[in-house]
Image: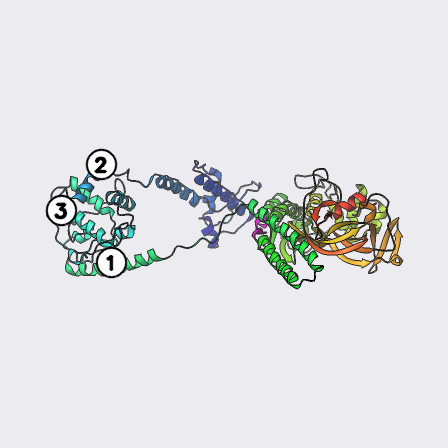
Amino acid sequence: NVFDVMRNGQRTLTPELMDIILQATDVVVEMFENVKSREPLVPADAKLVDTLHKLSHPETPGENIFGDDDAPAPPAPSSEAPEEEFAIEEPAAQEAASDGGIDDISEDEFEALLDELHGSSAPGAASKAAPAPAAPTPPAGGDDITDDEFEALLDELHGKGQFSSEEAAEPAKPAAQQPTAPAGSDDEISDDEFEALLDQLHGSGQGPSKKEEAPSKPAPAPVDEKATQAVQKAKQQQAAASAPKAAPAPKAPAAKAPAAKEAAKKDDKKAAQAPPQAETTVRVDTKRLDQIMNMVGELVLVRNRLLSLGINTNDESMTKAIANLDVVTGDLQGAVMKTRMQPIKKVFGRFPRVVRDLARSLKKEITLQLEGEETDLDKNLVEALADPLVHLVRNSVDHGVEMPDDRAAAGKPRMGTVKLSASQEGDHILLTIEDDGKGMDPDKLKDIAISRGVLDADAAARMSDVEAFNLIFAPGFSTKTEISDISGRGVGMDVVKTKINQLNGTVNIDSQLGKGTRLDIKVPLTLAILPTLMIVVGKQTFALPLGAVNEIINMDIKKTNTVDGQLTMIVRSKAIPLFFLGEWLIRGPKNIHKEKGHVVVVQIGTQQVGFVVDALIGQEEVVIKPLDALLQGTPGMAGATITSDGGIALILDIPSLLKRYARKPLK
C-alpha cells in the first residue's frame, strides 16, 4: 500500500508522487459515483495501476518510476485497495437489493413448517431428524431463509405482530421453567409464547442448537442461537433417516443457560427501551429562506416607520411598545440572517487544488495557507465571491510568486507562500490574499499605464504609489507582455473590481517591492438589509451605503481650492476632490449654495471623495428594492427603498456615480 510505505518513511513524498495520488483519488471518487448510480465500473488506467503497484514498494536508489513524463498528473490515494472494495461493493449492493421477502422459501419447506406449527407431524420429529453430534453445522446461505424471513412467516401465520430478531435468536427454556401467564397484549407475542412455539417445533425442553442435543458435551447451552436453524431442521426432517432421540442436555449447563438468557433479555429490553435519537436538523429550501428574509425586511421598514412616528408622540406606553418592537425586530433579523449564513470554507476548499495545479503548470513551488475557514457570511455572498477570489489567487501565483531559481538568487526560500484568510470586522467580512513574491514596482505600473493610454504622463507623475498599485484594476491593464492561457488579457482584475463594487464592497491593495503583495477585500455580511446614511439633496432624499462613508464635516469655503479645474478641500493636510450632488441628481434650475452644506467623505478603494449635500437625516437600515425595468441600468443608482416617513429614496451606487458624472474618472 502506497500510504503504508509513506507512513513508515520508506518513500519520500514528491510532487510527482502527489500527482499520482491525486489522480488515483479522482478515479476512486468516480467509481463511488458509479456505484451510487448503479452504473458499470470503468477500470482504472492500466498505467496508473502499474505505477501505484511500483510505488507500493519501498523506495530504491536510482529508480525511475515516473519516467520522463513531465506532464502534471491530477490527484489520489492508493487505488488498488479501493478497486477491490468496489469489486465487493457492487455484488453486495445487488444482493441487498434482492434480499428480503418470503419468496426464497420453497413450497416443501413451507409445508413442513405448517406441519410443525399445526401438529400434523410427530411432536418429536424435529429432534428425531437431528443429525449425529459429530456432524458439522451446515453453513448459512444457499436455500436457508434469514431471521427476518422467519419472523415474517410467523407473523403471517399467527397475526401476533412483530417481535425482535434478538428474541427469536434465544434458545428455549426447559419445560419445567415455562410460565403459563397469558400475553399482556394482543398485538405482540411475548417471550413465553415464543418459547412455547419453539418447544412445539423442536420438542419440549429442546432447543434448535446442535450443541444442546449432544449428550457428550457438558458446555453450557449457547444463548445467541439463530432461529433460522429451526427452518434448517424442518428441511432436514424430509430427507434425513430416522435417528434415536437425542438425550436432554446435562442439568448443570441447562441451569446456567437461563441465567445467561435472563441477562441477555435484560440487555435487549434496555436497548429496546432506549429512546431513539431525535433529529436535530431539517432541510429547508433556500427559496423559503429568501422569502422569510424578504418578510423580515418588510418588518424592518414598518419598524422604521413606527420609530419615526414615536418621536412625535407623547404617549409613554406607545413609546415603550415601539422600543420593544425595535428590539424584537432586531433579534428576529439577526436570527434569520444566521439561517442564511454559510462558512466560507465552502469557497476556500477549492483553492488547494487550484494553486497546486497552477504551480505545477508554471513550474513553481508554492504552498497555500488558509485561515478563518469557519468565518460565516451570507449564502449569496459565498457564491458571489467564488470567481473574484479565484482571479486573485491565480494572479498571486502567476504574477506574484517568482520562479524557484529567482527566489533562491534573491535569498528567499525556493518555496513561495500564498496566504488566504477571512475574518469578521463588525458587520463586514475582511478577506485577505497575501503572497511573499516579488511585489509590484509603481514606476513600472505607471509606464505600462502611459503606454496603453490609461493615463497621461502628468497624471502619472502626481500619482502616489498606492494609486499606482490600483492601476491593475483598470480595464485592459496587464503587466504581462504575452497572452497565455492563464493571464495577459487584462480582464481578470477588472472583473474582480466590478464584482466587489456590486457587492457594496471595497478592494485595497498594498505592495512592497521584493517582499510581496497584499489585497484586502471588505464586503458586508449580508446583501438583504443595507445600513445607509440618509441625505437630502434639493428636496429629494437619497441613501448612501454607510460602509463607504468615512466621515462628515461642515462645508468651509475657506478650505477649498481649485486644482487642475477640480474643486478640492483640504482635510487633514490632504486635498480631496469635492462634488456637488445637486448638479448630478436634481433636474431643472439648480439653486446650489457652494458656501453652505455638509461634506460627506466617502472611500472608494484608496481614494477619498467629498460629496456636498444640503442636509443630513441620519443612519437607517433599508431594504434594497430593484428598480423598474425602465430604470434598470441607470448610472449611479443601485436601487430604491421606503424611508421611515413613508417616502421613497434612491440608493446611490457611488463607483458608478463617479464613473458617469465626474469630469475625470478616478484611478
* Circle 3 residue: 123
Image x and y of residue 340, in percent:
58, 50
Residue type (three-letter) at the residue carrying disc 2 = Glu
Residue 346 colored magenta? yes
Q: Within 10 angstroms of label 2, few (less than 14), some, or many (20 or more) residues?
A: few
Report if residue 310 is visible in the image: yes
Where is 434 relative to 79, above or below? Answer: below
Residue type (three-letter) at the residue carrying disc 1 = Lys
Front residue of 597/571: it is 597
Residue at the bottom extreme of this rendering? 316
Q: Mark 1 or mark 3: which is in front?
A: 3
Report if residue 140 is visible in the image: no
* Circle 1 residue: 261
Where are the magenta residues, as a range? 339-348
- Image color mode: rainbow
- Residue 498 is left or right of residue 233, and the answer is right
Q: Within 10 angstroms of label 3, few (less than 14), some, or many (20 or more) residues?
A: some
Residue 598 colored magenta? no
- Residue 24 is left or right of residue 493, and the answer is left
Please report whichever mark, 2 or 3, sits nearer to the chain's N-terminal start. Answer: 2
Image x and y of residue 590, in percent:
86, 46
Q: Secondary structure at mark 1?
A: helix
Image x and y of residue 36, in percent:
44, 41
Please report whichever mark, 2 or 1, sits nearer to the chain's N-terminal start. Answer: 2
* Circle 2 residue: 107
Q: Secondary structure at mark 3?
A: loop
User: Is there CB contact under 8 Å for labels 1 and 3?
Assistant: no
Where is 478 relative to 374, above or below? Answer: above
User: Is there CB contact under 8 Å for labels 2 and 3?
Assistant: no
Q: Quadrant of residue 477?
A: top right
Please report whichever mark, 1 or 3, sits nearer to the chain's N-terminal start. Answer: 3
